Image (cartoon, rainbow, N blue to C red):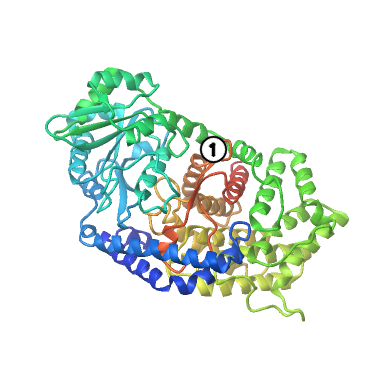
């Protein structure tokens, strides 16, 4: 019998196409009716990122733009109806290599709604391996056929056994499936990820290559007869020698994949030596022999950078992040507040009292009352968690003032007569509310000893779960659509972990809270991918790997194991993989890879596919990465 996760993974491409078509069609039909509601909800959930009251002109323009984009996506998806009935090139190849140590991994989604997939040599998942990692990239059936021949020879033939000792071989057999191959792709791709239908496939590939960080990329294209090689200019002696060994010609275009990888850091990680080959015959044996003859070695600059990232301890990474995040509190909302909490925890872990002193300086205007706090959103309620953390670390009048601020954030759960509301305000029917409202109530209960806060917290959690919990244990983001948005599941995981941390051991309802937490984390564990990440839509591996939900879920699992709520045997492997994934996506200067932008409730699955994935510094992503780094430091003490 399949587990729910296995069932989700083995759905056919035709089913995926049908569901996406229906979602996009629904989005187009309802977009104009729901956009203003969605925009207002998004602003309430994330006031630091989105405008809560867009002008009518802006709203109308956004409606028009969104409708055009979604309608175009629907047209393209429907046009690909016959193509998606066929098995993807990657899965077809992997099926022939079932016992050869390969796996199929998502790279992205084509403009036709088809999954872009890779066949990965499992040995390459750990960036510390000693072999040279070669990755083949093709587009179209002819290129995929050549790549399939290469992978089958390398992974299954006795004649290639010696090569397997020296090399790791992976591939993206068709980087632009379906009808997306209308014009040559340009690299590095322009536009926002992954929204532009003209560059979406290129953006998926570009960022995926940067994080996967092979030592050599070879773009494969059809040709007549034996292989003809092309090499870009690159200040890399081994590539220059390889080009001479192969008799390679100069590349024709500076914006083709090989030239761009050799000159620009993919995904802002590092450059990657690259070639292009045109061939109508098998070429792999010749390539690997030339690599040996030329003395080509790894790691590539990109893999060397990833190795530096994963070598950092939790304290080292937290220290790097603390220099860029948690430096202000211009609004009491959850994003800057969590970064400040991360700094407080870092200070405790390192014995550095300056972290506490600086956070106290930053919150000073709220402490002395010269700057009031506004309770106008769920984000504002959860922003008061920084005061609960400070109350735990201070004493006397200062502590009492912090407790008053915590109660200010928590007391919105009650009517003026002191009766608990059936559900807290500002929840917007979103799974986010399990974090936005629950932890501040639980922390208020711990700080005051008033059982009403715990009762109200349980009521809040039950009410939101009734709105958004799916039968499979994941959370839909809102009742508007079944999509299990990544951060929309990270919020419940983090929120319940925070509540449990504050919950008395002797309360009879603690067992219910533990069951909620364990059921959700078990459902999430099944959807972690081979890289350690969770995706923008949890159960859609063709969506991008998203940093914040990966950090939040990893944090929740780590705390669960550390405090005995979860089995270490079951969850420690997932925690280690998640922490590995976070490190690969966070640079020493605070630059981040693929943070979903601020997101309110969306009316369709397609809307979650189209949310911008930020590359660079981002306050939300930095706060979540800092939080998980300090939690991992606690776990590893």
Q: Quadrant of residue 153?
A: top left
Quadrant containing the C terminus in the rendered view: top right
Side of 17 relative to 637 (left or right) = left
Q: Residue at x 45, y 49 (%)?
A: 192
Q: Quadrant of residue 603?
A: bottom left
Q: Report whether residue 296 is seen.
A: no
Q: Residue at x 34, y 61 (%)?
A: 73
In the image, residue 499 sits, relative to residue 322, either above or below, namely below
In the image, residue 50 sits, relative to residue 97, either above or below, namely below
Q: Report whether residue 310 is seen.
A: yes
- Residue 76: where, in percent of width, then height? 29, 60
Side of 208 relative to 319 (left or right) = left
Q: Quadrant of residue 350?
A: top right
The residue under label 1 is 587
Disc 1 on helix, strand or loop? loop
Quadrant containing the N terminus in the rendered view: bottom left
């Amino acid at each position: 019998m399949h587990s729910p996760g296995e069932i989700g993974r083995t759905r056919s491409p035709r089913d995926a196409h049908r569901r996406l078509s229906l979602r996009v069609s629904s989005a187009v039909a309802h977009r104009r009716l729901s956009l203003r509601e969605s925009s207002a909800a998004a602003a309430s959930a994330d006031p630091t990122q989105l405008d809560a009251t867009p002008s009518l002109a802006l709203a109308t323009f956004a409606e028009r733009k969104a409708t055009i984009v979604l309608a175009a996506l629907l047209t393209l998806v429907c046009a690909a109806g016959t193509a998606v009935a066929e098995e993807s090139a990657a899965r077809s190849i992997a099926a022939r290599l079932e016992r050869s140590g390969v796996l199929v991994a998502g790279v992205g989604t084509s403009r036709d709604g088809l999954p872009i997939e890779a066949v990965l040599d499992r040995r390459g998942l750990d960036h510390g391996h000693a072999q040279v990692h070669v990755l083949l990239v093709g587009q179209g059936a002819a290129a995929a056929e050549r790549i399939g021949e290469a992978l089958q020879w390398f992974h299954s033939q006795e004649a290639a056994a010696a090569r397997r000792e020296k090399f790791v071989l992976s591939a993206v057999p068709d980087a632009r499936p379906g009808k997306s191959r209308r014009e040559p792709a340009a690299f590095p791709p322009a536009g926002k990820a992954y929204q532009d239908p003209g560059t979406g496939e290129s953006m998926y590939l570009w960022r995926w290559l940067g994080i996967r960080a092979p030592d050599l990329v070879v773009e494969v294209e059809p040709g007549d007869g034996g292989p003809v090689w092309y090499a870009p200019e690159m200040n890399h002696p081994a590539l220059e020698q390889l080009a001479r060994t192969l008799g390679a010609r100069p590349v024709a275009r500076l914006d083709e994949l090989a030239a761009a990888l050799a000159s620009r850091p993919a995904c802002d990680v590092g450059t990657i030596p690259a070639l292009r080959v045109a061939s109508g015959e098998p070429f792999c044996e010749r390539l690997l022999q030339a690599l040996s003859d030329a003395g080509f070695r790894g790691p590539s600059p990109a893999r060397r950078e990833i190795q530096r990232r994963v070598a950092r301890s939790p304290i080292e990474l937290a220290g790097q992040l603390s220099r860029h995040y948690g430096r202000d509190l211009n609004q009491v909302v959850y994003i800057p507040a969590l970064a400040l909490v991360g700094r407080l925890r870092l200070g405790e872990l390192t014995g550095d009292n300056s972290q506490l002193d600086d956070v106290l300086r930053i919150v000073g205007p709220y402490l002395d009352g010269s700057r009031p706090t506004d309770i106008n959103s769920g984000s504002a309620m959860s922003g008061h968690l920084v005061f609960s953390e400070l109350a735990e670390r201070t004493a006397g009048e200062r502590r009492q003032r912090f407790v008053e601020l915590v109660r200010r954030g928590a007391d919105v759960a009650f009517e003026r007569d002191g009766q608990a509301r059936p559900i807290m305000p500002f929840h917007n029917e979103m799974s986010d509310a399990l974090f936005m409202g629950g932890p501040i109530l639980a922390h208020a209960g711990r700080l005051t000893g008033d059982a009403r806060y715990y009762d109200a917290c349980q009521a809040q959690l039950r009410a939101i779960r009734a709105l958004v919990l799916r039968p499979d244990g994941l959370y839909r983001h809102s009742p508007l659509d079944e999509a299990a948005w990544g951060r929309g599941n990270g919020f419940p995981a983090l929120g319940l972990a925070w509540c449990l941390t504050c919950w008395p051991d002797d309360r009879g309802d603690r067992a219910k809270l533990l069951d909620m937490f364990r059921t959700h984390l078990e459902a999430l564990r099944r959807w972690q991918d081979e890289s350690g990440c969770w995706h923008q839509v949890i159960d859609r591996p063709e969506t991008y790997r998203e940093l914040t939900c990966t950090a939040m879920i990893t944090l929740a699992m780590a705390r669960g194991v550390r405090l005995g709520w979860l089995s270490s045997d079951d969850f420690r492997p997932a925690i280690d993989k998640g922490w590995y994934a976070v490190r690969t996506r966070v640079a020493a200067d605070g630059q981040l890879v693929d943070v979903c932008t601020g997101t309110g409730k969306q009316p369709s699955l397609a809307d979650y596919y189209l949310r911008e994935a930020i590359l660079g510094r981002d306050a939300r992503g930095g706060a979540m990465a800092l939080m998980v780094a300090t939690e991992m430091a606690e776990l590893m003490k």
